[in-house]
Each structure stands twice: as C-alpha cells, then as structure tokens.
Image (tube, coloured by chain):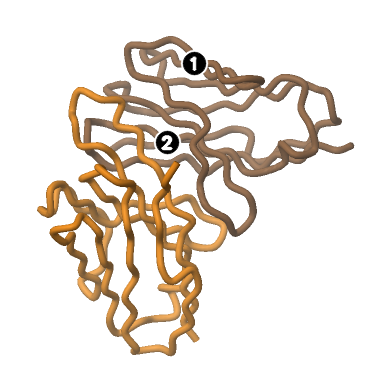
Chain colours: A orange, B brown
C-alpha cells in the first residue's frame, strides 16, 4: 500500500540558509500535518492543512511557512535556519472524513542538519 | 493544555517476558489514542489506534487498553522478542483532524 512520501530524506544546510521540505500524502488523504522531533525529544506539532486550508497551528516559528497544493502535497519552507532547527521533520496524512478513524499515517521523515 | 506522560522512560527485559508500557494524559476529552513504534533515527510506525468509545484493541502480540475516565492507556506486548527493541510512543488526538500530542516515549530493550 502507498505510504506518505517525504523528500529529501536528508538535508544539510548552513546557518541562515533556506530549506524546503516536501510531503506527498497517501492517495485520497486530504489532511496533512507537520511535526518536528528534536534529538531525544518527542514529536511536536507544527502546522496542519485540510483541503488546502490551514487547519491548525502549533509551535511553528515565524521563519517557517507551509502550504498545501491542489494535488494535496505540502511543502514546509524554512528560512534563516538556526542550529536549533536541526531535527527530524515528519509529515503525516489522514483522511479528512470526520466520521472515520482519523488515523494519522507518518512518513519516514526528513533529517535536517544545520551547520 | 493536554499533557501526555509515559512511564517508565526506559525498560529492559529478557526475551520472552511480557512488556507493559504505560501512558497517561491529563485531559480525558480525547477523540482517539495511538501507539507508535520508533526505531533509532527512523520514522513512526502506527501500531494500534483506540477510539475514545473503545476499551481495547488487539493486533497479534499487541494489546492496548484505554481508560478514558482515568486518563490512562496501557500497551501490552506478549512474549517479547529482541526485534521488539525500540521506542514506543503514545499520542492522543483531541478532536478529529486535530494535532497529535505525544508522550516522551518508553525506550525498550529486549535482551536475548
């Protein structure tokens, strides 16, 4: 079965650079979530989209922005990168039928290292 | 604000023993609860999802219970194997389409 696809899987950037992470949800899933997991920490919610509209926002820095496109894939744009942004970034998707189980399926993550 | 706690933070057992992992949450108004497995540096694999109206879910050697009123869930892994060594995270969903709030995880080591 198709899973959530994230690209790239690994990314190395310098401080103050910009990074773009991409997420392709499971086919027919219309809700996408972004989470950040720092070293030794649990995943923290950043932002989510439902039907291409932002549906919820967590502890996402102002330097970050995200959007969901017409084909339901999503991109997380990160500017003015800081050392503390080094983390594993997960994308998850779910089927937006509010009568469904709402299981969130996670992608393999993108490991961002800021030097 | 929902807080999710997992105790113990780490657990080491000999192969064959049953594992009992605990998860507690402060706000009992949840939509569902998920248990995940995470191998070092890897992604999150969903193991079981329990809806708020359910008391337990089973999949193979895994059984998860939910006591919403007391804010607790327990994951049982029967007859543990070295391949079960990983970090197990629980996460609660407050409402449909909402964010997951994760616990800190329990790091499990099953010794051969």
Residue ranking furthest to the right = B112
The residue identified by callout 2 is: B91
Q: Residue at x 20, y 69 (%)?
A: A65
Q: Is residue B59 above or below residue A86?
A: above
**C-alpha span from label 1 to label 2:** 15 Å
- Chain on which label 2 sits: B
Image x and y of residue A32, in percent: 26, 50
In the shown orientation, is residue B66 left or right of residue B74? left
Q: Residue at x 64, y 34 (%)?
A: B8
Q: Quadrant of the N terminus of chain A?
A: top left
Mark 2 surroundings: few (<14), some (14-19) or many (≥20) residues within 10 A: many
Could you say whether the residue bearing mark 1 is in a helix, strand or loop? strand
In-front residue for pair B33/B29: B33
Chain for mark 1?
B
Residue B4: x percent and y percent? 43, 35
| Mark 1 and mark 2 residues within 8 Å of each other at the beta carbon | no
Q: Which mark is residue B87?
A: none
Does residue B111 lie above or below A4 as drawn?
A: above
Q: Is residue A51 left or right of residue B64?
A: left
Q: Residue at x 52, y 37 (%)?
A: B36
Nearer to us of marks 1 and 2 is 1
Earlier in the chain: of badge 1 and badge 2, it is 1
What residue appears at the point 49 percent right and 56 percent down from the top-left corner?
A: A108
Q: Is residue B71 above or below residue B38?
A: above
Q: Nearer the viewer, residue B13 or A71?
A: A71
Image quarter of residue A19: bottom left
Number of the label disc, if any, that sits on residue B57? 1
Question: Dot 2 lies on which element?
Answer: strand
């Amino acid at each position: 079965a198709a899973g959530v696809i994230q690209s790239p899987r690994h990314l190395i950037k310098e401080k103050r650079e910009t990074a773009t992470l991409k997420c392709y949800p499971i086919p027919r899933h219309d809700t996408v979530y972004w989470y950040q997991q720092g070293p030794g920490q649990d995943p923290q919610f950043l932002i989510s989209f439902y039907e291409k509209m932002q549906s919820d926002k967590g502890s996402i820095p102002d330097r970050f922005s995200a959007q969901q496109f017409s084909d339901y894939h999503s991109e997380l744009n990160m500017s003015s990168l800081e050392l503390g942004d080094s983390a594993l970034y997960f994308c998850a998707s779910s089927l937006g039928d509010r009568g469904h189980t709402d299981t969130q399926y996670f992608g393999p993550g993108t490991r961002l290292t800021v030097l | 604000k929902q807080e999710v706690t997992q105790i113990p933070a780490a657990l080491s057992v000999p192969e064959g023993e049953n594992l009992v992992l605990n998860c507690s949450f402060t706000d009992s108004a949840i939509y569902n609860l998920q248990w995940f497995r995470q191998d070092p540096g890897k992604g999150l694999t969903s193991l079981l999802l329990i809806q708020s109206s359910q008391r337990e879910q089973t999949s193979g050697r895994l059984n998860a219970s939910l006591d919403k009123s007391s804010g607790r869930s327990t994951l049982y892994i029967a007859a543990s194997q070295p391949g079960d060594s990983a970090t197990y995270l629980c996460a609660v969903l407050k409402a449909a389409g909402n964010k997951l709030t994760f616990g800190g995880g329990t790091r499990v080591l099953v010794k051969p």
